[in-house]
Image (spheres, rainbow, N blue to C red):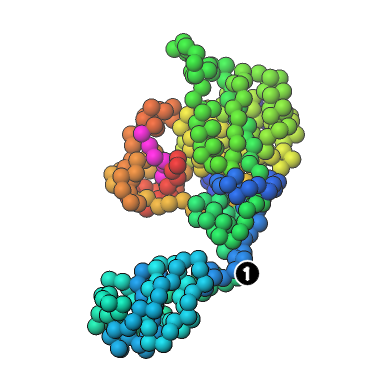
């Protein structure tokens, strides 16, 4: 026992960020596959994308109206010589004339201004311009060729998630097939003699498994992750060793809940060491989630999350998600948002403190009353949590980590 306590103390850390910093250099992104664009949505790009042509590919109108020469506007009125349509090569603009044009249509040779339809009047094949438009600068209401991006310009970086805007760019650049990182395979293992299935009827001394589903919910909010919950395992070293070895054979990351503290039946750290993993830390100066444990085996991260439900929520969101992002190929994960508390109190802790909050407005959140790290009922009212550095408190702003 004394040896185990000394080992644990040697591997304890001062902050969650310190723990993440130990793991990230030891893991690499998973492999790459090519998929049709429609299947790439939500995945992570393995290669950067360049524009295959100028965007826009020609000068185009930004408004419905009339394409004219700026120098002709002083005439006040011009004959309408025709109409320009989207997707067709434009007519040349005759001298001292106007061409009707719609938004997105190519600007004809010779035109250098588009006058908005609402600033004109049509009658008998002529268009009259409002007085305020008769001195418009050249290129007014025209989107210039290549103003968004020139051909060959980098438009999306490797490591970007294929969100709606990114999917639009890929389509606009003709990427019918896209190289993406394959989905990260995450194995979830819940341990504990007291843990029953969700459909079981527990005695007052037993628990239904909520932790496994908490981990699944946080992991699979990321469409580039596929996670599977293994059957719950009893607190038995032989059973744990066999199950964890099997899971590590096919998974890219293993997340275990329970069995990581200092109790006589907390076997997870011992079993992970016996499997040959490199233990990186055991305990972080934080609440909740102080006993969190992390190791790496052949480039695969192994997390042991404390069994209390709120500890699982916090450590999964705060410490595991950034590591999954690295595995998934995301190069630059988004920094946490900042939140100010509308109901700050004077409480302080000499550790990193994660306090559950409900968002009540833009950049504003309300502290929730949480009775303990097992208070899953009130945690369900939260949108996420703020992170307070040791000894600090008050309104903030503080780093905020949302569930969504």
Q: Residue at x 29, y 47 (%)?
A: 342
State the quadrant of the N terminus: top right
- Residue 281, horizontal then vertical, whole percent: 62, 40
Label 1 sits on a secondary structure element that is loop
Asked whether residue 384 is drawn in magenta, I would say yes
Reading the image, the residue beneath label 1 is: 152
Q: Residue 307, relative to residue 365: is it above or below?
A: above
Q: Residue at x 41, y 45 (%)?
A: 386
Q: Residue at x 65, y 47 (%)?
A: 35
Image position of 202 (left or right of 152) = left
Res. 98 image quadrant: bottom left
Asked whether residue 29 is drawn in magenta, I would say no
Which residues are drawn in magenta?
381-387
- Residue 201, horizontal then vertical, whole percent: 47, 11
Residue, far front: 124
Is residue 266 visible in the rendered structure shown here?
A: no
Q: Residue 314, relative to residue 26: is it above or below?
A: above
């Amino acid at each position: 026992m004394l040896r185990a306590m000394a080992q644990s103390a040697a591997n304890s850390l001062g902050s969650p960020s310190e723990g993440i910093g130990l793991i990230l250099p030891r893991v690499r992104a998973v492999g790459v596959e090519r998929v049709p664009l429609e299947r790439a949505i939500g995945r992570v790009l393995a290669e950067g994308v360049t524009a295959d042509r100028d965007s826009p590919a020609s000068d185009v109108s930004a408004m419905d109206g009339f394409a004219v020469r700026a120098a002709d506007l002083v005439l006040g009125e011009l004959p309408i010589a025709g109409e320009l349509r989207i997707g067709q090569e434009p007519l040349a603009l005759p001298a001292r004339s106007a061409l009707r044009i719609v938004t997105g249509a190519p600007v004809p040779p010779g035109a250098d201004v588009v006058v908005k339809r609402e600033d004109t009047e049509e009658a008998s094949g002529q268009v009259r311009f409002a007085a305020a438009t008769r001195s418009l600068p050249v290129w007014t209401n025209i989107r210039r060729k290549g103003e968004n991006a020139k051909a060959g310009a980098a438009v999306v970086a490797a490591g970007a998630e294929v969100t709606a805007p990114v999917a639009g760019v890929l389509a606009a650049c003709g990427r019918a097939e896209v190289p993406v990182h394959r989905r990260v395979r995450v194995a979830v293992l819940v341990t504990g003699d007291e843990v029953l299935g969700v459909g079981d009827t527990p005695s007052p001394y037993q628990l239904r498994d909520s932790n496994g589903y908490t981990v699944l919910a946080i992991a699979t909010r990321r469409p580039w992750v596929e996670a599977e919950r293994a059957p719950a395992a009893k607190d038995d070293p032989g059973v744990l060793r066999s199950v964890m070895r099997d899971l590590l054979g096919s998974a890219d990351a293993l997340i275990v809940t329970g069995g990581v503290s200092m109790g006589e039946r907390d076997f997870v750290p011992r079993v992970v060491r016996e499997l040959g993993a490199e233990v990186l830390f055991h305990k972080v100066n934080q609440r909740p989630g102080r006993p969190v444990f992390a190791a790496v085996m052949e480039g695969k991260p192994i997390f042991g999350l404390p069994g209390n439900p709120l500890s699982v929520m916090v450590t999964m969101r705060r410490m595991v998600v950034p590591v999954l992002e690295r595995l998934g190929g995301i190069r630059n994960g988004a920094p946490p948002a900042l939140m100010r508390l509308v109901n700050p109190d004077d409480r302080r802790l000499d550790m990193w403190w994660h306090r559950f909050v409900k968002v009540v407005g833009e950049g504003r959140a309300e502290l929730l009353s949480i009775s303990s790290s097992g208070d899953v009922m009130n945690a369900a009212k939260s949108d996420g949590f703020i992170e307070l550095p040791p000894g600090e408190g008050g309104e903030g702003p503080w780093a905020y980590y949302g569930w969504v």
